[in-house]
Image: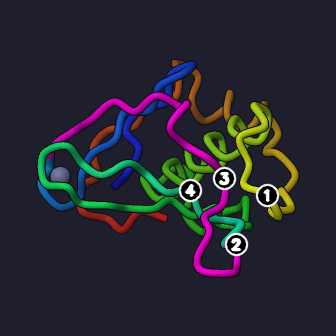
Amino acid sequence: MPITAFYDNTLTLHCARCGGTQDVPLDLLVVGILREATVEPLTIALPPCPACNGQEFLFHPQEYAHPHPGSYGHLHRLLVIALYDRLVALGKVQDGVTTLPPLDPAVLADWFPEGLVLPMSTGEEAG
Ligand SMILES: [Zn+2]
Protein backbone atom coordinates (compact mmCIF):
# COMPACT_ATOMS: atom_id res chain seq x y z
CA MET A 1 0.00 0.00 0.00
CA PRO A 2 2.12 2.88 -1.20
CA ILE A 3 2.21 6.19 0.58
CA THR A 4 1.05 8.99 -1.66
CA ALA A 5 1.39 11.84 0.84
CA PHE A 6 2.80 12.42 4.28
CA TYR A 7 1.55 15.45 6.16
CA ASP A 8 2.39 16.42 9.74
CA ASN A 9 0.18 13.89 11.47
CA THR A 10 -1.44 11.99 8.63
CA LEU A 11 -0.47 9.62 5.86
CA THR A 12 -2.41 9.21 2.67
CA LEU A 13 -2.22 5.63 1.43
CA HIS A 14 -3.15 4.16 -1.92
CA CYS A 15 -4.40 0.59 -1.70
CA ALA A 16 -2.56 -1.65 -4.15
CA ARG A 17 -5.42 -4.18 -4.05
CA CYS A 18 -8.53 -2.09 -4.72
CA GLY A 19 -7.11 1.27 -5.74
CA GLY A 20 -8.83 3.11 -2.92
CA THR A 21 -7.18 5.73 -0.79
CA GLN A 22 -7.34 6.27 2.95
CA ASP A 23 -5.96 8.84 5.36
CA VAL A 24 -4.28 7.29 8.38
CA PRO A 25 -3.36 9.24 11.52
CA LEU A 26 0.18 8.56 12.72
CA ASP A 27 -1.32 7.66 16.11
CA LEU A 28 -2.32 4.28 14.66
CA LEU A 29 1.19 3.34 13.57
CA VAL A 30 4.21 1.91 15.35
CA VAL A 31 7.69 0.81 14.27
CA GLY A 32 8.15 -2.95 14.54
CA ILE A 33 5.64 -5.76 14.66
CA LEU A 34 5.42 -8.74 16.96
CA ARG A 35 5.28 -12.16 15.37
CA GLU A 36 4.93 -14.84 17.99
CA ALA A 37 8.02 -14.41 20.20
CA THR A 38 10.06 -12.26 17.85
CA VAL A 39 10.00 -8.63 16.75
CA GLU A 40 10.40 -7.55 13.14
CA PRO A 41 12.12 -4.24 13.73
CA LEU A 42 11.97 -2.79 10.21
CA THR A 43 8.26 -3.34 9.61
CA ILE A 44 5.42 -0.86 10.00
CA ALA A 45 1.97 -2.45 9.87
CA LEU A 46 -0.68 -0.35 8.14
CA PRO A 47 -4.32 -0.47 9.20
CA PRO A 48 -6.55 -2.55 6.93
CA CYS A 49 -8.00 -0.81 3.90
CA PRO A 50 -11.55 0.32 4.78
CA ALA A 51 -12.79 -0.63 1.32
CA CYS A 52 -11.33 -4.10 0.75
CA ASN A 53 -9.88 -4.96 4.18
CA GLY A 54 -6.46 -5.58 2.61
CA GLN A 55 -3.61 -5.43 5.09
CA GLU A 56 -0.22 -4.20 3.99
CA PHE A 57 3.14 -3.38 5.50
CA LEU A 58 5.93 -0.91 4.93
CA PHE A 59 9.57 -1.89 5.36
CA HIS A 60 12.49 0.35 6.20
CA PRO A 61 14.96 -0.48 3.39
CA GLN A 62 18.09 -0.06 5.58
CA GLU A 63 19.65 1.42 2.45
CA TYR A 64 19.37 5.16 1.92
CA ALA A 65 20.75 5.32 -1.59
CA HIS A 66 18.84 4.05 -4.64
CA PRO A 67 20.05 2.89 -8.07
CA HIS A 68 17.64 5.27 -9.83
CA PRO A 69 17.64 8.61 -7.99
CA GLY A 70 14.47 10.57 -8.56
CA SER A 71 12.47 7.51 -9.66
CA TYR A 72 9.14 6.63 -8.10
CA GLY A 73 10.82 3.79 -6.20
CA HIS A 74 13.45 6.14 -4.80
CA LEU A 75 10.97 8.79 -3.72
CA HIS A 76 8.66 6.22 -2.14
CA ARG A 77 11.64 4.78 -0.26
CA LEU A 78 12.38 8.26 1.11
CA LEU A 79 8.78 8.61 2.31
CA VAL A 80 8.95 5.27 4.09
CA ILE A 81 12.17 6.32 5.82
CA ALA A 82 10.65 9.70 6.70
CA LEU A 83 7.67 7.94 8.26
CA TYR A 84 9.92 5.57 10.18
CA ASP A 85 12.03 8.47 11.45
CA ARG A 86 8.92 10.41 12.53
CA LEU A 87 7.52 7.45 14.45
CA VAL A 88 10.88 6.93 16.16
CA ALA A 89 11.02 10.63 17.07
CA LEU A 90 7.55 10.31 18.58
CA GLY A 91 8.63 7.28 20.60
CA LYS A 92 6.19 5.04 18.75
CA VAL A 93 8.46 1.99 18.74
CA GLN A 94 7.66 -1.58 19.73
CA ASP A 95 9.57 -2.93 22.72
CA GLY A 96 12.77 -4.68 21.70
CA VAL A 97 13.34 -2.69 18.50
CA THR A 98 16.76 -1.14 17.95
CA THR A 99 16.15 1.82 15.68
CA LEU A 100 18.21 2.97 12.71
CA PRO A 101 19.79 6.41 12.36
CA PRO A 102 17.54 8.99 10.73
CA LEU A 103 17.79 10.26 7.19
CA ASP A 104 19.41 13.67 6.79
CA PRO A 105 16.46 16.10 6.58
CA ALA A 106 18.31 18.00 3.85
CA VAL A 107 17.90 14.96 1.57
CA LEU A 108 14.13 15.08 1.98
CA ALA A 109 14.09 18.82 1.41
CA ASP A 110 16.09 18.37 -1.80
CA TRP A 111 13.80 15.73 -3.27
CA PHE A 112 10.51 17.11 -1.93
CA PRO A 113 10.83 20.88 -2.06
CA GLU A 114 7.05 21.31 -2.05
CA GLY A 115 6.11 18.78 0.62
CA LEU A 116 6.03 15.01 0.97
CA VAL A 117 3.63 14.18 -1.83
CA LEU A 118 4.10 11.55 -4.54
CA PRO A 119 2.18 10.96 -7.74
CA MET A 120 0.40 7.60 -7.96
CA SER A 121 2.58 4.72 -9.05
CA THR A 122 2.96 4.32 -12.77
CA GLY A 123 3.25 0.58 -12.33
CA GLU A 124 6.89 0.57 -11.36
CA GLU A 125 7.56 -1.49 -8.29
CA ALA A 126 7.82 0.59 -5.13
CA GLY A 127 10.64 -0.01 -2.77
ZN1 LIG B 1 -8.32 -1.68 -0.61
Callout 3–callout 4 Cβ contact below 8 Å: yes
What amino acid is at disc 2? Answer: Val
Q: Nearer the viewer, residue 95 or 51?
A: 95
Q: Residues within 10 Å of mark 2 (few under 14, many from 20)?
A: some
Q: Nearer the viewer, residue 18 or 107?
A: 18
Query: Which of disc 4 and disc 2 is earlier in sequence?
Result: 2
Residue drawn at (87%, 52%) of the image: 101
What amino acid is at disc 1? Answer: Asp
Q: CA distance from mark 3 to mark 1?
A: 9 Å
Seen in the picture, residue 77 relative to 51 is either above or below; the reply is: below
Residue drawn at (12%, 55%) of the image: 18
Callout 2–callout 4 Cβ contact below 8 Å: no
Q: Secondary structure at mark 1?
A: loop
| Majority SS type along the magenta span | strand
Which portion, as a residue range, is magenta? 20-39
- Percent coordinates x, y for residue 99 in the rendering: 83, 56
Q: CA distance from mark 2 to mark 4?
A: 11 Å
Query: Which of disc 3 and disc 2 is earlier in sequence?
Result: 3
Q: Residue 31 — which label?
A: 3
Q: Which residue in the structure is indicated by mark 4?
A: 44
Q: Quadrant of the N terminus?
A: bottom left
